[in-house]
Image (tube, rainbow, N blue to C red):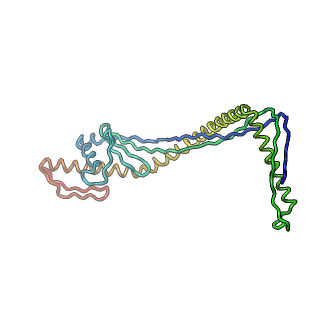
Amino acid sequence: MIHLAKSIEQAWRQTVEQSASASDEISETGRINAEIRLDAEMGDAALEMLERVMAGDFGYEDPWERDSSGCYIKNVGDVIVTYNPLTHRLNVETQLTESLTAEATATAEACGFTIGNVAVEALGQYYDDGWGGRTKEAALSEAQKKAEEKLSQAIEELNRQQNPETFLNAENKASKTAREKAELELEKMKENARIAMRERIMFILANSEENVNHMINRAVGEAYRQTLRKVVLDSGGRVITDDNTGSIINMELELR
């Protein structure tokens, strides 16, 4: 066993370290707007029929959802397509969200004066035959090292006990600096993330164009088809053939 004792009457200076983190969630939205001008060619009837197509009245495809404002909404891959029947405008939108966390550390110096006594002890284990290298000399060396570490800890504890405000001020100062560094780093991360998100949004919108156009063209084509059928039938005519294969519509009508 090793015993260490020390009488202290000294000024000291110690570095205090503190850590901090800053977090935020950012989002970026990209959208494309277009206008569907069915009314210019076939009148309001075609626009009304388009709504019925979107509502799934004809079993043509899965119906669009409808929000509280009356707009029709459909998910197409990574984008959301919205049709406003009041303005006849189509909106293609995508949104990305990312959570970011920045971490930082900072130090501050604490200074004070301590008077007092500290004492510590430490044990080391050894075997008489020195098995596994655990000789008496090795045990004494190990105990000495442990005792010196304990002595340093005891001195620091005494410093803190006698100078609590000094340590508190240093810790607060280090914490404030660490928070400022973390917030600054977070702003840099957000700026870089927004640039990357905008590039990703442009890619998503461009990549979705073909699928969105295909879906809208099919819906518009079905609206035309149903409008023609209604006009013919309402006027006393009849539909002789009506073949709808993919995006191609073949109709033979008899008008009266």
Q: Nearer the viewer, residue 161 or 226?
A: 161
Give the residue drawn at x 57%, y 43%.
100
Whether 239 is drawn above or below 173: the answer is below
Q: Position of residue 119 (x, y in %)?
A: 82, 44
Q: Nearer the viewer, residue 65 or 86?
A: 65
Q: Which picture quadrant has residue 115?
A: top right
Q: Position of residue 71 (x, y in %)?
A: 32, 41
Q: Position of residue 250 (x, y in %)?
A: 25, 57
- In the drawing, does residue 27 fall left or right of residue 179? left
Whether 10 is drawn above or below 101: the answer is above
Q: Nearer the viewer, residue 197 or 27?
A: 27
- Farthest residue in the right direction? 137
Give the residue drawn at x 84%, y 34%.
10
Task: Quarter of the image for the N terminus: give it.
Answer: bottom right
Give the residue drawn at x 60%, y 41%.
189
Q: Position of residue 181 (x, y in %)?
A: 66, 37
Whether 225 is drawn above or below 6: the answer is below
- In the drawing, does residue 108 fall left or right of residue 24? right
Count of labels shown? 0
Q: Nearer the viewer, residue 36 or 134?
A: 134
Give the residue drawn at x 27%, y 51%.
56
- In the drawing, does residue 34 fall left or right of residue 158? left
Q: Which picture quadrant has residue 44?
A: top left
